[in-house]
């Protein structure tokens, strides 16, 4: 779905900004879900593993890889050969070409900081998440590959928000609270559902709920 553009931005970058901003919003959304599921308490992780251990491993891996891929894409070069990329560097170039020299210059040190913070993430993306570097993957047979810490991702996201804020303040006099993105359903809802399922099993085992209750409620299954 095409993202609505904001006419307060220069016309040449309106679509670029709308798309990048939406990507940053959902990047934070996925990270919020990741934190809800795996970064809040050991009790939540234990509950997830107890209830659906294999699914927990897969969901954790998929979310963490997706977060790193999105970060890497945002931090890629403005172009690959003759093909333009929809990245923060492309946004900076388009702003400069539109005559918005001041904001383009203001972005530079913030982009450098973001790129430095996300260097390890981009290396993972290039070596083994999106590509299969032979030496890296063969070495992993002896020493497993490890993903980023939560602190690493949080540092990257702070640097990313600084870049976004620099541009948005220029044209809207405000910023988007990406880190407080509100979703109808989050990882908290999943954990609550698991906790309720566990409690349901306890009630069945204790005889407070009949063993046929679930089949009666969902006669054709789920």
Image (cartoon, rainbow, N blue to C red):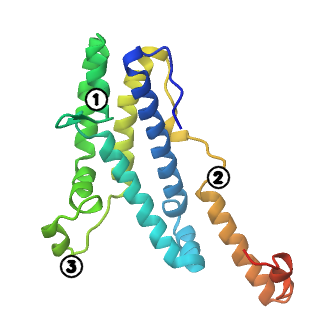
- Relative vertical location of residue 137 with respect to residue 104 in this rendering, above or below: below
Task: Count residues near mark 2 (Cα–Cα under 10 Å), then give few for <14, some for 14-19, many for 20+.
Answer: few
Would you say residue 140 is visible in this rendering?
A: yes
Instruction: State the residue at coordinates (35%, 58%).
Output: 149
Would you say residue 106 is visible in this rendering?
A: no
Q: Are marks 1 and 3 in contact (CB under 8 Å)?
A: no
Task: Count residues near mark 1 (Cα–Cα under 10 Å), then give few for <14, some for 14-19, many for 20+.
Answer: many
Q: Look at discs 1 and 2 and give the one toward the viewer.
A: 1
Label 1: which secondary element: helix
Disc 1 to disc 2, how far (Cα)? Answer: 33 Å
- Relative vertical location of residue 166 with respect to residue 179 in this rendering, above or below: above
Residue 196: name its quadrant. Answer: bottom right
Residue 129: name its quadrant. Answer: bottom left
- Identity of the residue furthest to the top in this view: 99
Q: Earlier in the sequence, mark 2 or mark 3?
A: 3
Task: Count residues near mark 3 (Cα–Cα under 10 Å), then give few for <14, some for 14-19, many for 20+.
Answer: few
Instruction: State the residue at coordinates (45%, 72%).
Output: 57
- Relative vertical location of residue 74 with respect to residue 98 in this rendering, above or below: below
Name the image quarter holding the C terminus.
bottom right
Q: Position of residue 144 (x, y in %)?
A: 25, 74
- Identity of the residue furthest to the front in this view: 82
Q: Is residue 108 left or right of residue 208?
A: left
Q: Which residue is mark 3?
A: 141
Disc 1 to disc 3, how far (Cα)? Answer: 38 Å
Q: Which mark is residue 4?
A: none
Instruction: State the residue at coordinates (21%, 74%).
Output: 140
Q: Which residue is mark 2?
A: 185
Q: Which mark is residue 90?
A: 1
Q: Is residue 197 left or right of residue 52?
A: right
């Amino acid at each position: 779905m095409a993202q609505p553009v904001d006419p307060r931005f220069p016309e040449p970058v309106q679509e670029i900004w709308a798309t990048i901003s939406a990507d940053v919003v959902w990047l934070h959304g996925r990270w919020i879900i990741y934190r809800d599921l795996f970064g809040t308490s050991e009790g939540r992780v234990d509950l997830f593993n107890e209830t659906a251990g294999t699914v927990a491993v897969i969901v954790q891996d998929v979310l963490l890889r997706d977060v790193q891929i999105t970060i890497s894409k945002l931090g890629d070069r403005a172009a690959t050969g003759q093909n333009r990329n929809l990245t923060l560097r492309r946004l900076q170039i388009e702003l400069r070409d539109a005559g918005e020299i001041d904001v383009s210059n203001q972005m530079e040190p913030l982009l450098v900081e973001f790129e430095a913070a996300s260097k390890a993430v981009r290396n993972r993306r290039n070596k083994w998440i999106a590509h299969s570097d032979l030496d890296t993957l063969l070495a992993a047979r002896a020493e497993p590959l490890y993903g980023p810490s939560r602190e690493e991702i949080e540092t990257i996201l702070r640097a990313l928000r600084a870049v976004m804020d620099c541009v948005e303040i220029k044209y809207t006099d405000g910023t988007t609270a990406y880190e407080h993105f509100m979703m109808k359903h989050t990882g908290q809802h999943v954990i609550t559902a698991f906790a309720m399922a566990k409690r349901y099993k306890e009630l069945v085992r204790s005889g407070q709920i009949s063993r046929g209750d679930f089949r009666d409620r969902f006669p054709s299954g789920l």
